[in-house]
């Protein structure tokens, strides 16, 4: 299994002035520790009550990733995951392309239908119905793929109309930046994973049995669409934290690895010092690779 880090909290000792230096420490430590990807949430308010009060510090995701890109050389970068309604589709494609070009080909497109109504209403974002957001999600993925393929023909969708979807420069990642779709909805989300994505992401709060069922659903969609199920990376998050021991991590990850998950994502919430993250990578990544 591969392993990555998600930074889900920016409220650290030292106040707002410490955010940049601490994020730099985490990014450098994650790269030194050998983690595959550094992810940030694409939110504007903190998740209350799950992580902290809504008015706790929260960075705009792509600006934060661009900063990390400038102080690292290897680690890949993505949002876990972008809410489709926060940016128009063409703008999102340009944003991820820019991150990929400036990072030397290290960007992911992590995307989903979005859900946090409070921050949308709070900051004046549109908050369409769930049905509409799923339709927007599919159209946004189609538009991004078209732009990354260099196809400038007009796009006429229900929610987006682009007269000239020009993408210049093109991404450096070949054939394109990988696409991760977050969520586990059986009828729409997992069908889109099978049709378009390079990776899925599951929040596995329900444990191995629920996760196994979701993988069976994904496999059925792949069979129906003629997609090779093994081409899709299965990532799991929401159940591992950087403060855990290697033994605890391996025992938690083992049943998920047995089901076919190949990538776990650790949450960085209060473990913000560099040395523990580097040590975690050195000690834990070899053990996870053996699963």
Image (tube, grey):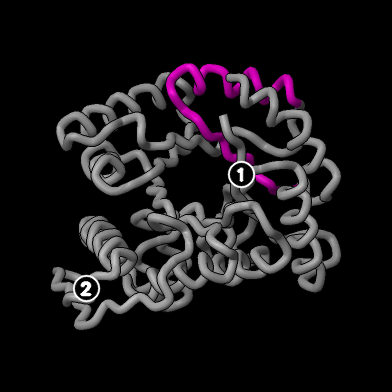
- Judged from the image, the secondary structure of the residue bearing numbered disc 1 is loop
The quarter in which the C terminus is drawn is: top right
Q: Residues within 10 Å of mark 2 (few under 14, many from 20)?
A: some
Horizontal and vertical percent for residue 28? 76, 55
* Residue located beneath label 1 in the image: 36
- Percent coordinates x, y for residue 254 in the rendering: 57, 18
Where does the image place residue 171, in percent across and percent down from the top left? 44, 66
Q: Quadrant of residue 166?
A: bottom left
Crowdedness near tag 1: few (<14), some (14–19) or many (≥20) residues, C-alpha within 10 Å: many
Give the magenta part as a residue range. 246-270
Residue 259 seen in the figure: yes
Q: In the rendered view, would you say 70 is above or below 195? A: below
Figure quadrant of residue 144: bottom left
Q: In the figure, is residue 258 to the left or right of 239?
A: left
State the separation of the CA atoms marked 1 and 2: 33 Å
**First in sequence: mark 1 vs mark 2:** 1
Is 248 in front, or is 194?
Answer: 194
Q: Position of residue 79 (x, y in %)?
A: 51, 57
Element carrying mark 2: loop
């Amino acid at each position: 299994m591969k392993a990555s880090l998600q930074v889900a909290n920016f409220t650290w000792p030292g106040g707002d002035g410490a955010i940049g230096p601490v994020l730099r420490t985490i990014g450098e430590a994650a790269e030194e520790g050998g983690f595959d990807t550094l992810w940030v949430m694409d939110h504007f308010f903190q998740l209350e009550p799950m992580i902290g009060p809504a008015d706790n510090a929260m960075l705009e995701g792509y600006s934060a990733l661009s900063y990390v890109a400038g102080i690292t050389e290897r680690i890949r970068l993505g949002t876990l995951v972008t809410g489709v309604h926060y940016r128009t589709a063409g703008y999102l494609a340009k944003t991820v392309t820019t991150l990929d070009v400036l990072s030397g080909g290290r960007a992911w497109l992590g995307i989903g239908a979005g859900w946090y109504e409070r921050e949308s209403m709070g900051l004046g974002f549109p908050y369409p119905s769930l049905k509409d957001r799923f339709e927007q999600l599919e159209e946004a993925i189609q538009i991004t793929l078209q732009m990354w393929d260099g196809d400038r023909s007009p796009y006429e969708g229900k929610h987006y109309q682009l007269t000239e979807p020009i993408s210049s420069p093109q991404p450096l990642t070949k054939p394109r930046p990988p696409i991760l779709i977050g969520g586990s909805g059986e009828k729409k989300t997992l069908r889109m994973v099978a049709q378009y994505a390079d990776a899925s992401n599951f929040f596995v709060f329900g444990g191995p049995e629920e996760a196994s069922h979701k993988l069976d659903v994904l496999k059925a969609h792949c069979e129906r669409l003629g997609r090779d199920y093994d081409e899709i990376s299965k990532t799991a998050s929401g159940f591992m934290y950087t403060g855990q021991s290697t033994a605890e991590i391996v025992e938690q990850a083992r049943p998920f690895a047995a089901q076919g998950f190949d990538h776990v994502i650790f949450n960085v919430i209060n473990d913000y010092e560099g040395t523990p993250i580097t040590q975690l990578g050195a000690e834990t990544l070899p053990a996870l690779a053996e699963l």
